Amino acid sequence: MAEQSRILKLGIHGFDGLFATGIPSGSAVLVEGGPGSGKTNFCLTALLSLCKQGHKCLYMSFEEPEPRLREHLSGFSIKPEELEKKGILKIKRFNALDIARSVEALLSEAKKELLIDVQPVLIPTDFEPDIVFVDSLTSISSAFSGEEYRFRIYMEQFFRYLEKNNITSFLIREVAHPTHTGDLFEEQGEAVSFLSDGIIAIYNTLYTDTGKRGRALEVVKMRGTEFKRQIVEFEITKEGLKVYAERMLKGPYKLT
Ligand SMILES: Nc1ncnc2c1ncn2[C@@H]1O[C@H](COP(=O)(O)OP(=O)(O)OP(=O)(O)O)[C@@H](O)[C@H]1O
Ligand SMILES: [Mg+2]
């Protein structure tokens, strides 16, 4: 990638201004939030903008089928099909159970070494992306049910693979409770928190006086850049996310 691409601008309205510079390329960034909080829409908005800037992007969906994801993008001014034709975008659905089975087979072959080659299990061999989106780690982790150590090994290898190939990644993780609001919680797949370079937390907000719900997000961690430590509101529109960094959350509220 060219020199100027060392720092990524996600091109999400109002979001890039939260950073002194931007997201260092090569980072592994977790996008965390509760059900329906907007994780997929956040990633899809970034996806199209990054493709438009010339980055080769792979969207790996373990949840929604490809046509549904393209449907989410139908309101955007640029059509995903055009980007796919140009070879700059690939949207692909994966089956998490297949991956869990392949990892099991690889691990029994590798015996004690615990070193497996995740590349054939994960990244399509005919596409070399600069940026990968995984929607979601939670689905992969569920497919490893009861085999937490296998998921851990797989994740470590996956992060190593991304790092070696200088691939930037956005990894969605569904969390039952917001991680960063003081609630104590334990869950499968905690290993990924310390392996990651950045965490973006997405919240469903509840205004307790009016009973209205809203949406908010914050950058919790981003190695290698300063950022505004502030929870900001956003909206989901048919053209993707719009972040309002200048709007403070008003009145009594809870993050859910
Ligand atoms: N064009 C739109 N305008 C307004 N709201 C929208 C639009 N498209 C989607 N939404 C809202 O976005 C919400 C879901 O967003 P998204 O799928 O990104 O969340 P998620 O965190 O990925 O959810 P999940 O936990 O199901 O994976 C839906 O509840 C829907 O109401
Ligand atoms: Mg989703």
Image (tube, helix red, strand yellow):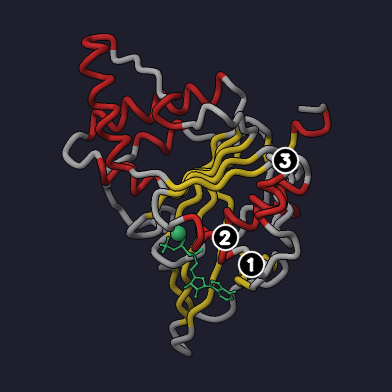
Give whichever of discs 2 and 3 has the lower sequence position. Answer: 3
Q: Quadrant of the N terminus?
A: top right
Q: Do the numbered discs 1 and 2 sit on residues whose CB atoms are within 8 Å?
A: yes
Is 63 placed left or right of 97 in the picture? right
Seen in the picture, residue 200 relative to 8 is either above or below; the reply is below
Secondary structure, mark 2, is helix
Q: Quadrant of residue 193?
A: top left
Image quarter for ligand 2: bottom left
Residue 48, horizontal then vertical, whole percent? 68, 53
Q: Tell me how far mark 3 sits from mark 1, CA to CA.
A: 24 Å
Residue at 69% over, 46% down: 85
How crowded is the residue under tag 1: few (<14 C-alpha within 10 Å), some, or many (20+)? Answer: some
- The mark that comes first in sequence, 3 or 1, is 3
Task: State whether residue 198 appears in this view.
Answer: no
In this rendering, position of residue 9 left or right of residue 253: right
Q: For the point 40% across and 68% down, which residue is it?
A: 256
Identified at 35% across, 17% down, the residue is 116
Q: Label 3 neighbourhood size at 10 Å, few (<14), some (14-19), many (20+)?
A: some
Is any part of residue 13 visible from this angle? Answer: yes
Q: Disc 2 marks which residue?
A: 70
Judge the density around disc 2: few (<14), some (14-19), many (≥20) Cα neighbours within 10 Å. Answer: some
SS for callout 3 = strand
Q: Nearer the viewer, residue 157 or 60?
A: 60
Which residue is denoted by mark 3 in the rendering?
8
Q: Say what amino acid the circle numbered 2 marks.
A: Arg
Amino acid type assigned to the residue bearing label 1 in the image: Ser
**Looking at the image, is mark 3 or mark 1 nearer the viewer?**
1
Residue 157 pos. (x, y %): 41, 23
Q: What residue is shown with label 1? A: 74
Displayed quadrant of residue 231: bottom right
